[in-house]
Image (spheres, rainbow, N blue to C red):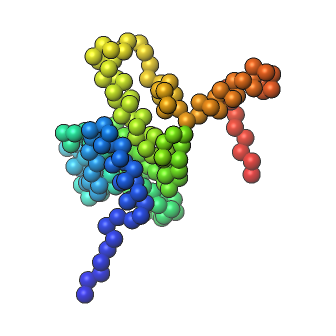
Amino acid sequence: MYRKKIIVNEYEERTSEVLDEVVKKYDARLFSKTRVADAIQITNSGLSSKEYSYALKAHFDFVVCKKDSTSEFAVEFDEPHHRYNNSAIYNDKLKNNICCKLKFPLLRITSEYFEKIGRFPTILSWITELYFLEERFYAAQDKGDIPQDEPWLWFCMVGYDPFSYFRVFIQKAYDKGLCSDPMTEYIWKLQ
């Protein structure tokens, strides 16, 4: 008798649901359990033999692609064992190095990324939306619809800055002399 294995856990399923909802809005596609070597061109890439071998065996939890299936970025859901299991830590470093060397965006998330932020149902959906908005911003610049010297500022996208209320609150407090600086430079962590 063989032992049955769970293909995706509850967090991976939730990640898939969140990503799928956003990518559909941008005419993109989502793939799960995609081999690293299938998402990124590793041949003649300059990877070390250890990295190259790992890329052939390892997979990304999720890969977001354009409509034509061209890889855009990957998402990894890191469960708690990724912080203390030496094998997981080592493999994560290998995957991070590969993505860094090949300039392939990799987003590592935990369950905290499923929390609501502003008008967005999750932090993950907010980050994913911003990725696509940035891509569209630069495409509009290439077409001449936006001046080339205009910088991409995510917090200037109307409705996409969940922290704007707090920025306004701090600025008003500063204007009334209730705080010493309108821009927070230091955040104290209470223990």
In the rendered view, tell whether residue 141 sits above or below residue 61: above
Quarter of the image where the N terminus is located: bottom left
- Tell me where residue 173 appears, x and y as whole percent: 75, 26
Q: Nearer the viewer, residue 1 or 55?
A: 1
- Tell me where residue 14 appears, x and y as whole percent: 41, 57
Q: Nearer the viewer, residue 2 or 58?
A: 2
- Tell me where residue 56 appears, x and y as whole percent: 24, 55
Q: Residue at x 30, y 13 (%)?
A: 144
The answer to whether 184 appears left or right of 150 in the picture is: right
In the rendered view, tell whether residue 140 sits above or below residue 11: above
Residue 28, located in which quarter of the rendered image?
A: top left
What count of labels does the image hold? 0
Residue 179, located in which quarter of the rendered image?
A: top right
Can residue 124 be seen here? The reply is yes
The answer to whether 123 appears left or right of 54 in the picture is: right
Q: Residue at x 25, y 54 (%)?
A: 35
Q: Nearer the viewer, residue 118 or 58?
A: 118
Q: Residue at x 75, y 23 (%)?
A: 174
- Tell me where residue 180 appears, x and y as whole percent: 78, 24
In the rendered view, tell whether residue 167 sits above or below residue 110: above
Q: Residue furthest right?
A: 177
In the rendered view, tell whether residue 6 sits above or below residue 89: below
Q: Residue at x 49, y 31 (%)?
A: 159
Residue 145, located in which quarter of the rendered image?
A: top left
Can residue 50 be seen here? The reply is no
